[in-house]
Amino acid sequence: MLLLAFVVVMEQAFSTVADRVAAVQERIARAEARAGRSPGTVRLVAVTKRVPAARVAEAAAAGVTEFGENYVQEARAKIPELTQYIATDINWHLIGHLQTNKAKYAVLLFPLIHTVDTYQLAQELGRQTSKRHKTQNVLIEVNLSGDPGRAGARPEESLELADRVGAVPGLELKGLMGMAPYAEGSEDARPHFRRLRALFDRLPGPNRQILSMGMSGDFEVAIEEGATLVRIGTALFGKREGG
């Protein structure tokens, strides 16, 4: 285990962002094949929390078109800065907790918000999008950890919340998002992903488009369990300062 960790650290130290993008895309393709899924079924979202704009641009140059930010304030600074590095359009996802008072900024920055976990937040997003005569795509965040201190709707309440959110004017509910509890091995995440997939399968067809689950340490298991979108940070950019 220590040797494997050392190899991973050394690979990250001496590889470029483009190399890591290629390696992650290959791992995604292999996981799709193991699961009997068509190539290209799973979308890669590069997580750019605390990643400088110049390095985000390296990932874009390597072919990544979708990026995820955890913090609205960081995105408000970073997204305009990126215009000096890249000319192509990229799609931004909000994957971190969203405070209601930041909804007015979020709807201007993110075509897809992954972290709707209360009806109150959904209502505010709906109000903000209606003001701007637009539609906001959202996912329901489900708390898979069982920890009441973590963000996300409780699994047993998530489908009822989905029904209510799906009826909010200005919002388009596209699916579910979840994060497995921290564990030593990726296989430990499998039952949590399986549970989220079971909830996802109970959504009405129009709301059953995106299943966002899987991160750097467990995304291959997530793909095997049905993820359509994975959120990868460390495997692309290395360990970031501040975690």
Image (spheres, rainbow, N blue to C red):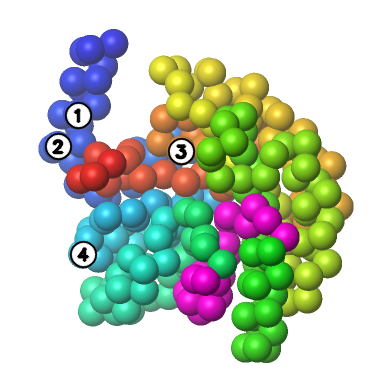
Which mark sits nearer the N-terminus, 3 or 1? 1
Q: Which residue is mark 1?
A: 9
Q: Is residue 191 above or below residue 196?
A: above
- SS type, badge 2: helix
Question: Dot 4, how many residues are within 10 Å of its Cα: few (below 14), some (14-19), or many (20+)?
Answer: some
The residue nearer to you, when weighing 41 against 170, is 170
Q: Is residue 108 above or below residue 35?
A: below
Q: Is residue 62 above or below residue 72?
A: above
- SS type, badge 3: loop
Q: Residue at x 61, y 29 (%)?
A: 146
**CA distance separating discs 1 and 2:** 6 Å
Three-letter amino acid code of the residue under disc 3: Met
Q: Which residue is mark 2?
A: 13
Please report contact status of discs 1 and 2: CB closer than 8 Å, yes or no: yes
Which mark sits nearer the N-terminus, 4 or 3? 4
Three-letter amino acid code of the residue under disc 4: Ala
**CA distance separating discs 2 and 3:** 20 Å
Q: Which residue is mark 4?
A: 54
**CA distance separating discs 4 and 3:** 22 Å
Q: Residue at x 61, y 45 (%)?
A: 152
Identify the disc placed on residue 215.
Answer: 3
Q: Start and end of the magenta stretch?
A: 101-119
Mark 2 vs mark 3, foreground winner is: 3
Q: Residue 46: x percent and y percent?
A: 40, 52
**CA distance separating discs 4 and 2:** 17 Å
Q: Residue 62: x percent and y percent?
A: 32, 57
Which mark sits nearer the N-terminus, 1 or 4? 1
Three-letter amino acid code of the residue under disc 1: Val
Q: Residue at x 64, y 64 (%)?
A: 121
Q: Magenta span has 80? A: no
Question: Dot 3, how many residues are within 10 Å of its Cα: few (below 14), some (14-19), or many (20+)?
Answer: many
